[in-house]
Image (tube, rainbow, N blue to C red):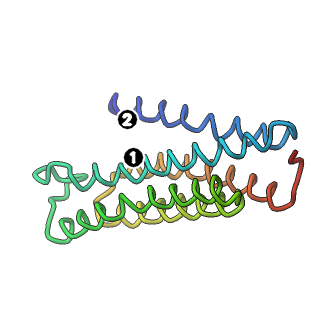
Amino acid sequence: MRQPFVIAVLLTMAGVVPFLALVTIVLLDPVESQTAIEVLISYGAVILSFVGAVHWGFALRDSAHPVNGVPLGPATLQSERQLLVFGVVPALIGWLALSAMLHFNAPALALFLLLAGFFITIVVETIGRGRNVVAGNYLALRWAVSVVVLVTLLIVLFAVLSGMRLA
């Protein structure tokens, strides 16, 4: 493993900590659960936007450098255009989630939108791996963290829908 990837793994794991801390607060502290849900939705929207922006990096990398030894061809160039478009979608979904929470007091809708955004993103990245647009080590890291994020958001969504321990 190269050093930048090791650093990426460490930073990614650090980025998961707020998800885990916030779901713990939601489940264990009814007094602070509403605030924790709002912070979770905000953090989720920011992270979803960040994940989308990574796709711009994939699309704008130096096309002279192959991905995993496979030269870039016309199909990859088409994929790069799609990545640029897709790179904006997670940010839009995050914005809609924030709007649902802040302006419509709909945390369940916001959590559902974040769940959909993270799920769609990992599916698109998996497809991108099959097209040699997304590196395998990146995809493995993203799947590991996506499972944690999706489970966390799903637990909080169920807590909100059931009214469980919410002040």
Q: Which residue is mark 1?
A: 137
Using the rendered view, name the quadrant where residue 6 is placed: top left
Return the x and y of residue 45 as percentages of the image width and height: 54, 50
At a point 34% along the width and 28% down the height, the residue shown is 3
68 lies left or right of 54: left
Using the rendered view, name the quadrant where residue 157 is placed: bottom right
Decide: is 107 above or below 38.
Answer: below
Quadrant of the snapshot with the C terminus: top right
Decide: is 95 above or below 25.
Answer: below
At a point 46% along the width and 35% down the height, the residue shown is 9
Using the rendered view, name the quadrant where residue 103 is placed: bottom right
* Total numbered circles: 2
At a point 35% along the width and 66% down the height, the residue shown is 130
Q: Tell me if label 1 and label 2 are in contact, CB under 8 Å.
A: yes
**Crowd tier of the residue under label 2, counting other residues whose Cα lies within 10 Å: few below 14, some 14–19, many 20 or above:** few
At a point 62% along the width and 34% down the height, the residue shown is 17
Return the x and y of residue 164 as percentages of the image width and height: 88, 53
Q: Which residue is mark 2?
A: 5
